[in-house]
Structures are given as C-alpha cells and as structure tokens.
Image: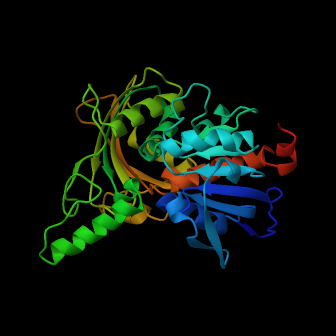
Amino acid sequence: MLDFGYPTRMTQSMTVAVLGATGAVGQEFLRLFERRQFPVDELRLLASPRSAGHKMRFRDRDAIVEAVSPESFAGVDLAFFSAGASRSREYAPAAIAAGAIVIDNSSAFRMEPGVPLVIPEINLDAIGPADRLIANPNCTAIILLMAIAPLRTLGTIERVIVSTYQSASGGGAAVMQELEDQTRAVLDGREPEPRHLPHPYAFNLFSHNTPINADGLNEEEAKVIEESRKILGETNLRINVTCVRVPVLRAHTESITVEFSGVAPSEDEVRDVFGRAPGVILVDDRAANHFPMPREASGRAEVLVGRIRRDPSHPNAICLMASGDQLLKGAALNAVQIAERLMQAGRLDPVGLAGAG
C-alpha cells in the first residue's frame, strides 16, 4: 500500500485497488494510471497469496502486492478487477459493501440482468446513478463493436459475420511467454512444447481454446454474440462469429461483414463515418496495401479500421477489417475510460462516495 498525495485535474485523489495486479492486464492498469494522470492517492495492489510480497514499480517507487481478502477493500473508492470470474464473484460483493465502485474485467457479471456492460463510446448511458458494479466487455466484442457501432448512423444493421485473428495477449502473460518460447524453439530446430494451450502455437493457428457448447460455438464466440447484443441493445441481432488464435503476440484483428436492412452505404460514406467516430482511426490505403495490422495497433488506445469494400456477394453488405490492442482498449483502457467518465459526472468524488452508503 502506498500513499502518493497526487492532485488531479478531474477530481480529488482516490484510494484505488487493482485485483489481479501482477497479470498482463493488471500491469497495463499501472501504466495507464501514470500515462493518463489518473488520480491515485493510495494504491492497493492485490493478487493471490502466491504473489504477495511481489514488487511492482509505480511512479518511480516500489509498490508491494498484497494477498487479497475481503478486508482489502476497506476505504477503497474504486476497484479494478482483472483476476478471473471466480475471484470477481468472491470479492466484488465485499468491495461493494465496503463502499467501492467495482469495474470488473472478467466474465462473471457481464450477462447479469441489471449489471451495465459498457463501452464508453457506445453505451455509457447504460450506467445508472445507483450502479456500483460495472462490467467490462470481452476484448473481442469491444474491438468488434468499436468498428460496427458507428455504422448504425448509416442504416439498420441486420446481420454481422466476423472471423477473428486473436493474439496471445488474450490468454494473458503466460500465453504470451509460451508463444515467445515456442517461437525460439522452432527457430532453433526444436519441437514447440504446449504448456497452457492445447496445440503448438508458434507458426500455427487453431480454433479458440475455450469449451465448445452443444451448438458448436466455443465459449469465446458465444460471449461475443451475447455481449454484442446486450451492448447494442439489440437482442435479436443476427451475428455469426468464428474465433481463431493466431501466433501474434499482442492485438486482435477481425474480418467483419456488416449486412444492412437496405442497400449498403457507399465506401465513402463508411470512411466518412469512421473519420469522425471517437476511439477509431481509419487505416485504408489500397495503393499501399496498408490496412489495420496488429503490429500497428499494439500499444495504441484506438481501434484501427479499414479494408472497406462492398460485399460482391450481397448488395446490402459491406466488409472491413479492425485491429485493436487487447490489453488496452480490449481490457484495461476501456475500464479506465469508464472510471474517467464517472469522475467527469461526479460519481467518483470520494466525498460523494462517503455519503452513498
């Protein structure tokens, strides 16, 4: 636990907890707090007992990771959770009871009725004045919806077909390390050894490694479908998703076909919309064959969109690509943006929280 006494332009400084601090997303939270001058006065880094005592650098000082317990959240104003669904279900009630607002990056509460599932650029108004638990969407769904939500100004979307090219970062730090280790092994003439994934990862790709349901959808695909419908408020949206793990270290890429209820908008209309949409950058240079790539999306806050073209098989459809950093906009950044919007609305003033009960 560290005290920083750090003033901010947005509100008073707060006591902030990060559960899952030592993971890939947890580490991104700390970098974002510094980069965006997030108003952290007291920081609590929480993780499992095996990580207790681990040191993490924050604002040129060492912060010590503590083993999480229900008592860890006493006095906390804001808690970012990124330690998996079981940990979120176990500790979110304690954090809320202690007076904190919880922004949860796991799948634990996303589809719970009454729990807002939020991408700030799309449905910030889903957060009600009494909500103290806010769910951060699946990373693949965030990147997809950042690309298709702006297109709703051009007509009614009836169907979406998406194929994903998902990076190692979606599996966390251990899977990222596995890809690096296997790549070195193959280049050295050795066989890659899967540890956290079911198949060799280096120089290979395979269907996303989550359980498959009775309909043939893996868990990742089902999440994207369900969460997209909830975020857009379109329970009957027709959407088909194929999720594939590819040997890219960081940032997911998606190939997307959007079908409208009438004739599809022109390519220029689509480019114009993306040129004005918050949180996206248009990358669409046919002459240079320059379109969204994970290499360029890595480390960026925005989602890259491009490769815009009409679907030659359907007059009502357009096709595009999107690429976004899974650890940033797909996870930690989206959560921090939610908190920033709450601060701007006066919801995260510690004085106000103290009286919120």
State whether residue 192 is above or below residue 323. below
Give the residue displayed 49% in from the left and 42% down from the top: 85
- Left/right placement of residue 103 relative to residue 341 reads left
State whether residue 354 is above or below residue 240. below
- Left/right placement of residue 253 relative to residue 197 reads right
Give the residue displayed 24% in from the left and 30% down from the top: 216
Give the residue displayed 76% in from the left and 49% down from the top: 343
Comparing 326 with 357, the one in front is 357
- Left/right placement of residue 252 relative to residue 149 reads left
- Left/right placement of residue 121 relative to residue 284 reads right
Q: Is residue 285 visible?
A: no
Which quarter of the rendering shows the C terminus?
A: top right
Comparing 234 with 60, the one in front is 60
Residue 338, percent from left and from top: 65, 47
Which quarter of the rendering shows the N terminus?
A: bottom right
Residue 160, percent from left and from top: 36, 32
Identify the colour scheme used.
Answer: rainbow
Residue 184, by quadrant, is bottom left
Residue 156, percent from left and from top: 46, 25
Residue 166, percent from left and from top: 33, 52
